[in-house]
Amino acid sequence: MAKQAMAGELRTLVYFRRTVKEVDSEGSTHQREEPVFHDSQGREQAVHCKWVNAHGAEVFTAMQLKLRQPAKLTMRYSPRIVPTLLVYKGKDPVPYEVVSVDDVEDRHCWLEVTVQRKEAAR
């Protein structure tokens, strides 16, 4: 049976952002984040998903793979979701990075996105 979520389970708001590198007139490189989903006025839009943190045996597997605070998101399909995006859970200021994106059964109906907490810059 296909992986899916009931409508009531899609209660976690997440924001997807892409990192854009820009070079200014002096040749300096700067990075900024821009929203992947936005409304007609350009305001960032949240996506509803089912968020499940790793638990049980998944925690030990995650430790072996050196994942930091792994979680799985189940959401409606969107071709905009790619492995290079950052994911913000609600208003949490520390992003998650995408580990994998799975188009469940290649039906373009559901996505299962595995994320991990982004490592702090040193």
Image: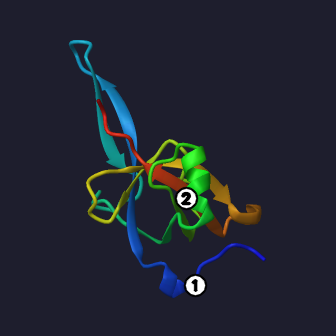
In the drawing, what numbered circle is on residue 6?
1
Q: Is residue 27 above or below residue 4?
A: above
Q: Position of residue 52 (x, y in %)?
A: 51, 69
Q: Residues within 10 Å of mark 1 (few under 14, many from 20)?
A: few
The single residue placed furthest to the left in the displayed view is 26
Distance between mark 2 and mark 1 Cα atoms:
25 Å
Q: Position of residue 4 (x, y in %)?
A: 64, 76
Residue at x 37%, y 66% (from the top left corner): 46
- Camera-near label (2 vs 1) is 2
Which residue carries the number 2 mark? 59
In percent of the image, x 57 and y 84: which residue is there?
Answer: 6
Residue at 47% from the left image edge and 51% from the top image edge: 116
Q: Secondary structure at mark 2?
A: helix
Picture quarter containing residue 75? bottom right
Q: Amino acid at mark 1?
A: Met
Quarter containing the N terminus: bottom right
Looking at the rendering, which quadrant does residue 32 occupy? top left
Location of the C terminus by quadrant is top left
